[in-house]
Amino acid sequence: MKGTIRVNLIFALIGFVITFLFAVRTNLPVTSLIRGGIGAAVWFLLAFLFRIVLGALEPLPKDQKGSGSLNSDTASNEDVRGARLDLVTPDESDELNDLLKPDADKTSITEESLGQVDSFQPLNPPKLVTTKEKDPEELAKALRHLTEDEGGR
């Protein structure tokens, strides 16, 4: 962690003063003291979390490596397994180039898919009955019946 407990106490004092000054304007002094104490506790915890974050972000000194308990001269590869991270990616440019080149296998797959496209026939549903042959009064009755079922709108 970065700093000492003194940093937390300074933050708590600042939190107490700010909270007390804002609370004393509208509350009784005892209530303002209680709220100031609660504010000091919250600011103390926030300073503690802030110190933890700063300590985590701080880089390790050059004389320490990893956890500091492993000596790289005496430790074998089995002892430090999982302590190192390999960030090198393998070279896959040949595989990418093979994917971009047309092969005989790929052309046969595309020919099969084109053959399936040629054999496609759209669905021909039966046509709906036209209303030209119906009586206009009968259509009006049907429309009134449908609108009455929906609540008379």
Image: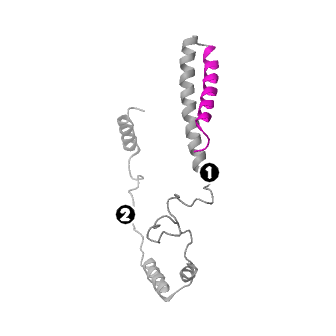
Q: Amino acid at mark 1?
A: Glu
Viewer-proximal residue among 59 and 115: 59
Which mark is drawn over residue 126? 2
Amino acid carrying mark 2 in the image:
Pro
What residue is drawn where x is 41% and y is 55%? 130
Q: Nearer the viewer, residue 123 or 98?
A: 98
Q: Where, quadrant-wise, is the N terminus in this rendering? A: top right
Give, as a single range, the part of the protein colored magenta.
1-25
The C terminus lies in quadrant = top left
Asked which quadrant contains residue 61, the reply is bottom right
Of tags 1 and 2, the one toward the viewer is 1
Give percent across and percent down for residue 4. Answer: 60, 38
Q: Residue at x 37, y 34 (%)?
A: 148
- Where is residue 63? Give x, y as percent: 61, 60
- Tell me the residue at 61%/13% (across/down): 26
Residue 76: image x %, image y %?
47, 71
Residue 10 highlighted magenta (yes or no)? yes
Lower sequence index among marks 1 and 2: 1
Question: Is the residue marked by circle 1 packed among few (<14), some (14-19), or many (20+) residues within 10 Å?
Answer: few
Return the x and y of residue 18 as percentages of the image width and height: 64, 23
For the view shown, which residue lies furthest in the bottom direction? 104
- Quick check: 31 above or below 75? above
The mark found on residue 118 in the picture is none
The foreground one among 21 and 99 is 21
For residue 58, which numbered disc appears in the image? 1
Q: Name the magenta segment's main secondary structure.
A: helix
